[in-house]
Each structure stands twice: as structure tokens, then as C-alpha cells.
Amino acid sequence: MSRTIVPLSQLSNGASGRVAALNTNGRNRRHLLDLGLVTGSRVEAIRRSPAGDPAAFNIKGAIIALRSEVSDQILVSLD
Amino acid sequence: MDLTNQSWDNKTVYQAFGLNPIQGQLVMALAGNPNTGKSTVFNALTGLRQHTGNWPGKTVLKTEGTFTHKNTRILLVDLPGTYSLLATSADEQVARDFICLGRPDATIVVADATCLERNLNLVLQVLEISPKAVVCVNLMDEAARRKIRVDVKALSRELGVPCVPTTARDGVGLEELKDTILDVATGVIATAPRKVTYEPSVEEAASRLEAQISPFLPGWVNHRWVALRLLEGDMSMIKAICKQMDDNARKIVFKDGAAI
Ligand SMILES: Nc1nc2c(ncn2[C@@H]2O[C@H](COP(=O)(O)OP(=O)(O)OP(=O)(O)O)[C@@H](O)[C@H]2O)c(=O)[nH]1
Ligand SMILES: [Mg+2]
């Protein structure tokens, strides 16, 4: 079964998916892991700031704002 | 020169963090993810006996306070709320340095009972540095309201350190928390934190590096943890070590009666 994989930045409000991969390394990657973005965890797009960036996501029960340059690096498979 | 037997003056260490514990006072740290109720716990324990300032050299807020429990005086430090101790931000660096170098007599990690999973990352990071820890599972009222049941006994067993359920806003569970942190700090409760085991190649490299660095960092609480950070290429850790080694070198020079 194949699922659609998109960057987290493409999720519209209310849409959710599971982390499939992180397209970054080193400190950046570590930081995303610390925020709870480990493979398989569920992420939901909550809202966007008026300019569209940053956007807020629900990650394991905390609302976390990410800039698109960061959310571009997070690949999610859509629910 | 043998650095391994160098005695470590804890008072000097605390002064480097802008703290002046009085004789016989235990030093404890309060860590946790943002918004888990750390300050609520801190206020409940210390009341009005608080002092706010900045960490030396950092624009990060530091709050310290005192209280007495069972005739033991305790200096409590409210650390900045962080998801991690791996020092990507000034807040994380302060929390990490204090737990790693300040070596508090006990660290309380305040966790949110409504989203425990996300809180356990920091809990495990603290346990990886220091075994003298207690997990305060806070917001139990909110968890109950959302029909989340936390098996605190099982959690304690899995983590190898005491976990205490609290509703800090209503003062529930704080007496047990105080008893527990005192017992952990004084060694009445012996903790056995769950050890994180990495892939064999990482474990092997870490133990080799650990053996090499430990003679040079006598005051550091946990050489395995430092070795793991070095393997990660953590620049802030490398800087912290360089600073520490300069301080050590200076002490040795003084001890030998030589002038700098
Ligand atoms: N329902 C409930 N709310 C709580 C409890 N403990 C704290 N709160 C509330 O949670 C909010 C955050 O509490 P703080 O004590 O400021 O949390 P903190 O961890 O210090 O937050 P930061 O310093 O910003 O990371 C406040 O509105 C508190 O009143 C609790 O046990 N139950
Ligand atoms: Mg606070």
C-alpha cells in the first residue's frame, strides 16, 4: 500500500500525518527529534500566522510553531 | 600530573552559577518541559523566599528559593523550561550545565501527565546525566479530566527513579514530593535509572572516549554522557570542556605554588 508523502509545510490546517523522514542532519535533526518529531509520530497542522509562516503544529500534545524552512525538511505520510 | 584525585570544591562550583548555599544546605534543581508547572511547584515549595536574577553571563532568568523540610535546609533552583538538554539554545545550555557541572543533590523533573510521552525525552536525558532524580508527574487533575490514567508505580519501575503524582496548582502531592526528593538527595532512596543503550559501534566508541577524557574532567558528573556529546560533535560541549580544563590547569598551577 502506498501513501502520499509530503513535506509538513504542505499540510493544510486540520490535516494530519505521521513523520516518515527528516531531511536534515546534525544539530538540526537532533532539535527536531527533541521536539518529538521521531519517525512514526503523529503531527497535525493547527493554524498559520497571517503571513502563512510560521505555522503551528500539534506534536505529541504540545503546540509548536515551525518556520517553513524547518517544516520543509520534515516528510510526513498523510493520514 | 594526576587529576583524578583532585578534590572538588562544591562551593566554588555553585558560585560559578551565582549561588551561595549555606553550610549544610542541599541544592536541588527543578527541570521540565515548558509549561508543565515548574514555577507552580517552585512557588508552592519556597513560598516568598525567592530571589530572581540572571545566570552569570547569560540573559536567561534564574529563580532560586529556599525551604526547610524535616529540619533540612534546601536551596531550590527553577531551571528554564526545555524539551532537551542538548544545548541548542541558551536555555538548554543553562539547564544542562547546571545539572552536569552544578551537580545538584537532586534534580526534580516536572512532567505533564496529559502528554507524558513527549516529556519522557527530557526525563531520560536528565537520568542519563544524573541518577539523583525524581519525576514529578504534574497536572494529574487535568489528566483525570481527560480520562488519562497514569500508572505512576509502573512508571517508577520502568524509569528506575521515584515518580510522584501531583496537582501542584492545588498543592496536592507536594508533601510526598518533598519527602521523596529529600530521601533521594540524602541517599535514603537509592535510584537505579534506566540506562539508554546505543548501537554497539556507538557504545564501543563512547567507552573508549570515556576512558580517555575522564582523567581530565574530575569534577564532571558523568563522563559517559560527555563522551556521547563529543561523538555527536556538540560544539558547545567542546567549548565548555575547554573552559573547564583551563580552570583546572589554573588550580593545579596554584597548588604547586607557581605564579601564573
Ligand atoms: N490544572 C492544573 N494546572 C496547573 C497545575 N500546575 C500548574 N498549572 C497551571 O499550568 C500553567 C503553567 O504553570 P507554570 O508553573 O507557569 O509552568 P512552568 O513549567 O513554570 O512554565 P514555563 O516556565 O513557562 O516553562 C499555569 O497556568 C498553572 O496555573 C496542575 O497541577 N493542574
Ligand atoms: Mg516557569
Image: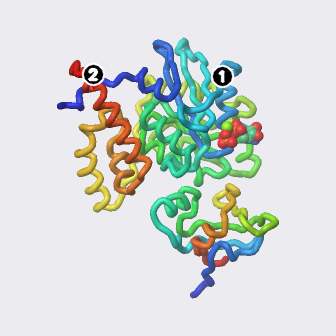
Looking at mark 2, is its residue's CB closer than 8 Å to ligand 2? Answer: no
| Residue underneath mark 1 | B50
Please say whether residue B24 is visible from this viewpoint.
yes
Is the residue A29 above or below the residue B178 in the image? below
Three-letter code, disc 2: Phe
Badge 2 crowding class, 10 Å Cα cut-off, few under 14, some 14 to 19, many 20 or more, is: few
Q: Chain of mark 1?
A: B
Question: Which residue is located at x 66 percent, y 22 percent?
Answer: B50
Residue drawn at the location 70% of the way across and 67% of the way down: A44
Q: How many marks?
A: 2
From the viewer's side, name the closer residue of A50 and B221.
Answer: A50
The amino acid at mark 1 is: Gln
User: Could you tell me which residue is drawn at 27 percent across and 56 percent down?
Assistant: B205
Residue B217: horizontal and vertical position, in percent? Answer: 30, 37
Q: Secondary structure at mark 2?
A: helix
Q: Position of residue B46 (x, y in %)?
A: 65, 22
Give residue B79's position: percent from left, percent from top: 58, 36
Name the residue: 28% across, 62% down: B201
Residue A36 lies in quadrant: bottom right
Q: Are marks 2 and 1 in contact (CB under 8 Å)?
A: no
Q: Chain of mark 2?
A: B
Q: Considering the numbered disc 1 on the image, is that residue within a helix, a strand or a loop?
A: strand
